[in-house]
Image (cartoon, grey):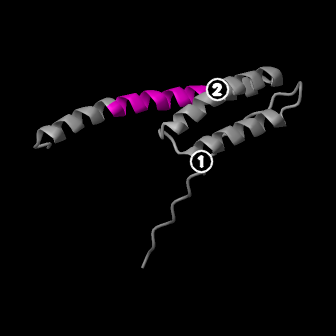
Amino acid sequence: MANTAQARKRARQAVKQRAHNASLRSTLRTAIKKIIKAVEAGDKVAATAVYSENVSVIDRIADKNIIHKNKASRHKSRLNAAIKAMSAEAPVAVAAKVKAAPKAKAAPKTA
């Protein structure tokens, strides 16, 4: 609980800033999804155009410290690698995160 006037004001500001940052993170995810969708469509020229349009969004959000600059660099690198891996006619799936299969539970020990 904020006790001083300054602390109450900072709490109000934090709520507004959190909402603004969430909006920017959503914009980032949308930009990344646009690039992935273009890559999956299989048109290398279109994917390159979408990448060049949206890479500035990624950089801008990293400059504002919404995400770390290395995370932005990692996204750009992987998306660019996916575009470069495309041939002119064959669609290439972007490497998606693979969840590990759950391990089987061990049988209970008997004495």
Instruction: Assess whether residue 20 is covered by the magenta stretch.
Output: yes
- Whether residue 97 is visible: no
The boundaries of the magenta stretch are: 17-31
Q: Quadrant of the C terminus?
A: bottom left
Q: Quadrant of the N terminus?
A: top left
Which one is in front, 75 or 97? Answer: 75
The residue identified by callout 1 is: 70
**Mark 2 vs 1, N-terminal side:** 2
| Residue 29 coordinates in the image, percent (x, y) | 55, 30
Q: Residue at left 56%, top 57%? A: 103
Instruction: Assess whether residue 83 is covered by the magenta stretch.
Output: no
Furthest toward the right, the residue is 88
Q: SS of the residue at dot 1?
A: helix
Judge whether 5 appears above or below 54 on screen.
below
In the displayed structure, does residue 41 sit left or right of residue 10?
A: right
The residue identified by callout 2 is: 54
- Mark 2 is surrounded, within 10 Å at the Cα level, by few (under 14), some (14 to 19) or many (20 or more) other residues, namely some
Look at label 1 and name its amino acid.
Asn
Judge whether 79 appears above or below 71 on screen.
above
| Residue 31 coordinates in the image, percent (x, y) | 60, 26
Furthest toward the left, the residue is 3
Q: Which mark is residue 104?
A: none
Q: Is the C-beta separation of discs 2 and 1 under 8 Å?
A: no
Rendering quarter of residue 93: top right
| Residue 58 coordinates in the image, percent (x, y) | 59, 33
Q: Residue at left 66%, top 40%? A: 96
- Mark 1 is surrounded, within 10 Å at the Cα level, by few (under 14), some (14 to 19) or many (20 or more) other residues, namely few
| Residue 42 coordinates in the image, percent (x, y) | 80, 24
In the displayed structure, does residue 7 sit left or right of residue 21?
A: left
Q: Residue at left 31%, top 29%? A: 16
Q: SS of the residue at dot 2?
A: helix
